[in-house]
Image: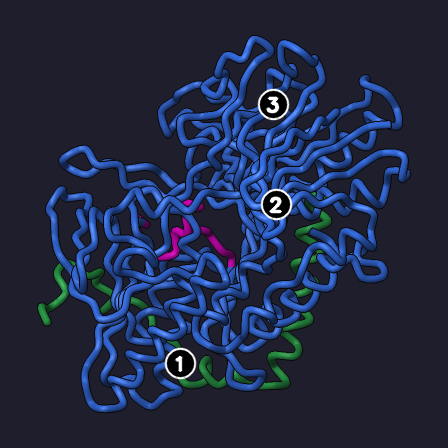
Chain colours: A green, B blue
Amino acid sequence: MKMIENSADLSNAPLPTDSTLRQRKNFFFQIFRFVALNIRMVKMIMKGNH
Amino acid sequence: MSKIVILGAGISGHTAALHLRRKLSKKHEVIVVTPNSKWNWIPSNIWVGVGKMTTDQVTFALAPIYKRKGITLYQGLATEIHPEGDAENSNAYISLTYTSPEKNGQVEKVEYDYLINATGPKLNFAATPGLGPDGHTVSVCTPSHAIEAAEKLSDVIAKMKSGIKQRIVVGVGHGTCTCEGAAFEYAFNVEHEIREAGVRDLAEIVYLTNEFELGDFGVGGMTFAQRGFETNSKLWTESLFRERGVSAILESHVEKIEPGVIHYEQLDGIKRTLEFDFAMLLPPFRGADIKAFNKAGEDISSTMFAPSGFMKVDADYTPKEFSEWLASDWPSTYQTPSYPNIFAVGIAFAPPHQISKPRKSAVGTLIAPSPPRTGMPSGVMGKTAALTIIDRIKKGASAVNHEASMANMGAACVASAGSGLSQGSAAAMTMYPVVPDYQRFPSSGRSTKDTYGELGLAGHWIKFMLHYLFIYKAKARPLWFLIPE
């Protein structure tokens, strides 16, 4: 199979650290983020007055 | 007594029908015309497309819900609008062709006092030769398409398990496609499935898109304020691609697809090819095939519809340069200019221009993501048109129109990137407003406080919660109306 031509250069994209990756899966931290994200979404909906 | 006809039972049409029925007495008739017998929560088709959900989990039959609520259902395809009636009868009506097994092919006229066009898109696979389930690629636009995608994905995973390397391409199948967020989501669900199957090292995953840069999502990208800095969706999305080892080909217009080979052109005007073993490419959208006629029977479709087939509403359609585009160009009432009793909502309305900057290749090919207007904005528009009609019926023709411009509306986009309540992940994004308003927010067009992105398990839980919440709402279960659009 031919190599891909012209794919985007992602070599400078920041990689998450191990602690960031752990945080993304940490159950207790994610419960906190779940609540925070829901509040953020409700506030955004209210702002649009819908 | 008023008759309100709604064309389409997707998110916007179904939302409008439920609100109209809830707020109008039974002497008024609410009629829904839809070619499909089932309602589909389209965002979850992504999970059907990787075999994590069945079609029964993302659809339900409309007839029992409408019977319970007192909504009349015509299972058929609307083909004509006669807003002035015809030579014999001055009552406005639509024509439909039945798609139900009992009356398949029969034609009927349905009169209306108010009409909401919420037909959604026509999936325009024909715009790219070889695209789609009748060609050489798969799609996740409908539950049946998603089932086929899951089966073919399962086949390539089986080949990898026997040691054969496979190239998987996910993206959009034309330079003017929209819904890049859905393609992004499917790409990372596929990546997750392949990793779970233990064959990630044998898969080359490529995201093929018309976006100028990663993180554009057809909305010109987003600027976030995080940890004291302004960052953007480009950086954030590129990070995810690098972390998961997914390649990206940007600025592309897919020209044609042959078995195992995608032919595409990029902004530099050079035509390239990409071989594949599995490809899920979304089609471009156009408006439904509906014609409009005046009282004399003359075709007025070009007056009511844009060349794309989407219906013109209260937007400013004056052709302008990108630098002159304004948030106020976007419609707010969704009422058609010629007929105040006709509205077009959701994907059915013609946007005045793109949100993401349109570009042309060196040889003049348009490569421009179309503006997304699915999901949350669709539901809000459906409700807005319904509330205007309700007020006109109750208060008279002078009632003030309700407004909900996409330039004053936020949206949440949760793109799952793997499943499982403990192992899942998602990119959760909010943006306000959807259409950038550089007069209100000079730096990025959006509020950096309300525009936000985050990766993690919590986003996956939200996506899961929204799946059940919106199906509950669409089934019009008790207190459904308390769930916002």
Counting residues from the N terminus, which is met first, the one under dot 3 or under dot 1? 1
> Mark 1 belongs to which amino acid?
Glu
**Quarter placement of the N terminus of chain B:** top right
Q: CA distance from mark 3 to mark 2?
A: 32 Å
Q: Quadrant of residue B323?
A: top left
Establish if A10 lies above or below B403.
below
Q: Is residue B35 magenta?
A: no
Q: Nearer the viewer, residue B382 or B66?
A: B66
Of badges 3 and 2, the one in the foreground is 2
Dot 3 falls on a residue whose secondary structure is loop
Looking at the rendered structure, the kind of residue marked 3 is: Thr
Residue plotted at (61% across, 74% down): B461
Which residue does the numbered mark 2 point to in the structure image? B103
Is residue B213 a member of the stretch shown in magenta?
A: yes
Q: Nearer the viewer, residue B37 or B44?
A: B37
Residue B445 % position (x, y): 49, 40
Which residue does the numbered mark 3 point to in the structure image? B336
Tell me, yes or no, whether dots 3 and 1 are on the same chain: yes
CB of mark 2 within 8 Å of CB of mark 1? no
Label 1: few (<14), some (14–19) or many (≥20) C-alpha neighbours in 10 Å? many
Tell me: B57 left or right of A43.
left
Prevalent SS, magenta region:
loop
The residue labelled by disc 1 is B193
CA separation, marks 3 and 1? 45 Å
Place of residue B200 in the rendered image (x, y in percent of width and height, measured from the top left): 29, 84
Q: Which residues are magenta?
A: B211-225
In the image, what residue type sits under mark 2? Lys
Percent x, y of residue B450: 60, 52
Rate crowding at label 2 as few (under 14), some (14 to 19) or many (20 or more) other CA atoms within 10 Å: few
At x 42% / y 47%, what residue is drawn?
A: B123
Name the residue: 88% across, 28% down. B394
Q: Position of residue B379 (x, y in %)?
A: 65, 47
